[in-house]
Image (spheres, rainbow, N blue to C red):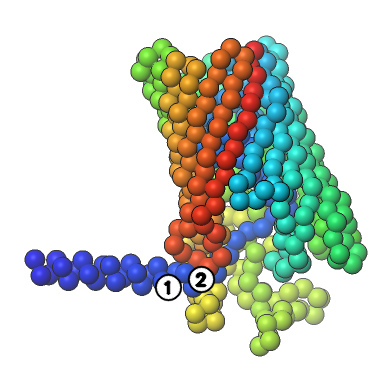
Amino acid sequence: MKTKRILFAALLLLGASLSSHAQTLQANYITTAMPFLTNTPDARGAALGFSGVATSPDAFSMFYNPAKYAFMSNDHTMIASGFNSFSTFPDRYMLYDAFAQRIGNSVIAATARYHRCSDVVLYDAYHQNLGSYKPLEFAVDVAYSYRFGDYLSAGVAGRFIHYAMNTNLPGYDAKSSSIACDVSVYYKRPLGNLVDMSLGAAITNIGTKMSYSYAEGHKDFIPTTLRLGSGFKFNFHPKNTLAVNLEFNKLMVPTPPIIAKDDTGNPLYNEDGSYQLLYGMDNNVSVFRGMFQSFYDAPGYVMNYATGDYEHVGSFYEELCEVNTGIGIEYNLADHFFVRTGYYHAPALKGGMDCLTEGLGMKFGIFGMDLSYSWYYKTGVVVNSQFGRSRLRWDMYFAF
């Protein structure tokens, strides 16, 4: 018994030591232009742990997986007004409108997003801080989805992205635009009489970089994102079902390298004017090279504020920390009322955090409404993580 107590005490001390040590590490997060493109636009997806690539189709499928539109149960779907409020940011909100129309085995959909956000910090290609500013952002999309038989569909989407921002940086542009596309697939089939399985995969926002400056070299990647997911729906009753979904997502954007600096903290430069790299790979590359490079370019070193030195965490471990996980559960009662909950994990080493989600939905005739509440909390590791934030979201839609 004494030995067990000593072992238990040792484990507690070890856990406290690891937590204390981890809090001295600086998050090596990945920044992109137009981060609002990764903000979950709908209350349903937010309630399901921000998952949606393999869930049942709805009007918000454009964001997660355009291929899902081909399996929607209605011939027409429209979001009259989607609105998300962010309780800790009163000046921040998103408007979302969408429409989808079935034509045989095909579906054509279009959406528009307008984002009014709080101050955004700008960085150059090597993660050097350029200051914070308040942009106005919007994106419009058109998608085509086709159903191949009973189980499989594929979808493509085109997107125009634009922002306008007033800055006091000499030579910096106040407007910028990008053209992007999505490719996706969706697979759904029954496994016996009581279970339906679904699989989804999508790469979204494959597009041109956006420039915040007239000067050459100041271009940022937009948030190209890979989503992979699966779902199982249990049919307890013709109108009562329980769906469980699991999703993984990752930014296909190069990881910022660690720049060599002198004793005063100023960056060191090569003869050609580029930064000297201490760890990692040059992330000032083309869009398609950056997509592939994002899987193996993590520096593997993180600044430890307690010692003032870079600490080795391993490139493979850092790459794993770039994968976020979402889990969602949805109970459908009589196809009129919906109860949802979920969990989302974004590793703190990349500036993320854990999040508990919950929500309710109702649908009568052609009208539906969803509500969700998300509570973000600190994971207990890594300097610069935020915690205690909450978000209340709601939206209305029409399906007929």
Q: Distance between the residues labelled 1 and 2?
A: 8 Å
Mark sitting on residue 21? 1
Residue 25's tag is 2
Residue at 71% x, 48% y is: 91
Which quarter of the rendered picture does the N terminus lie within? Answer: bottom left
Give the secondary structure at mark 2. Answer: loop
Most extreme residue toward the bottom is 263
Q: What residue type is labelled 2?
A: Leu
What amino acid type should be assigned to the residue bearing mark 1? Answer: His
Please indicate whether residue 341 sits to the left or right of residue 259 in the image: left
**Vertical position of residue 306 compared to residue 140: above or below:** below
Give the residue drawn at x 26%, y 67%: 11
Image side of residue 218 versus residue 289, left or right: right
Q: Residue furthest left?
A: 1
Q: Where is residue 112 in the image (x, y as percent from the top left)?
A: 75, 33
Q: Are the two marked residues, 1 and 2, in contact with CB atoms closer than 8 angstroms?
A: yes
Q: Residue at x 82, y 63 (%)?
A: 217
**Where 359 sits versus 9, above or below?**
above
Q: Write the residue at 62% across / 14% down.
A: 366
Residue 159, position in %: x, y?
Answer: 76, 37
Q: Residue 306's spot in the image, x, y percent? A: 49, 79
